[in-house]
Image (tube, grey):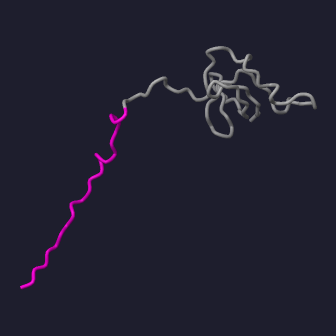
Amino acid sequence: MKQYVILHKVDGKPALDIAHQLESDEEMWIVTTTGHRAYPADKWAITDLMLDDTTSLQDLMDISSIPDGWPEHFQQAERAVAKKGTGLNIMDFIKMPEPVIKLRRRI
């Protein structure tokens, strides 16, 4: 598995991660450390990436190289899917046993 340093968007900001490309019909990238899908705007094979004293990884993170509308690493909905309080209440499914009270009478 060939590893790459990829430039992608996370929360609208450029981020560098280590990723690998899956062998499939479509181009699919996975961040190696988390297993999340990534959408690299640029990539560099780790074996080919040689930095001299004047280049840093920060120099590679250029937000202008990521096109507008590029997919995010974590895509969030603009609004909540359900209103607060309308979701599933787990307590509806848990049956609490009725307490058994044994009364002992004195005679």
Residue 80 placed where, x, y %?
43, 28
Q: Quadrant of residue 21?
A: top right
Looking at the picture, how far across and down is residue 4, in whole percent? Answer: 76, 31
**Residue occupying image coordinates x 49% and y 25%:** 77
Q: Provide residue 66's location: percent of width, then percent of height.
A: 70, 18
- Asked if 49 appears above or below 106 in the picture, the reply is above
Q: Quadrant of the C terminus?
A: bottom left
45 left or right of 107? right
Q: Nearer the viewer, residue 28 or 70?
A: 70
Q: Position of residue 26 (x, y in %)?
A: 62, 22
Does residue 90 sit above or below 13 in this rendering?
below
Please identify the dominant SS of the magenta region: loop
**38 horizontally vs 77: left or right:** right
In the image shown, does 11 or 2 lie closer to the viewer? 11
Left or right: 19 in relation to 58: left
- Judge from the rendering whether residue 103 lies leftward or rightward of residue 14; answer left or right: left
Name the residue nearer the viewer: 49 or 51: 51
Residue 74 falls inside the magenta stretch:
no
Residue at the far bottom: name it. Answer: 107
Point out the stretch of residues depicted in magenta. 84-107
Outermost residue toward the top?
68
Q: Which residue corresponds to the image point at 73% horizontal and 28% vertical from the top-left?
A: 6
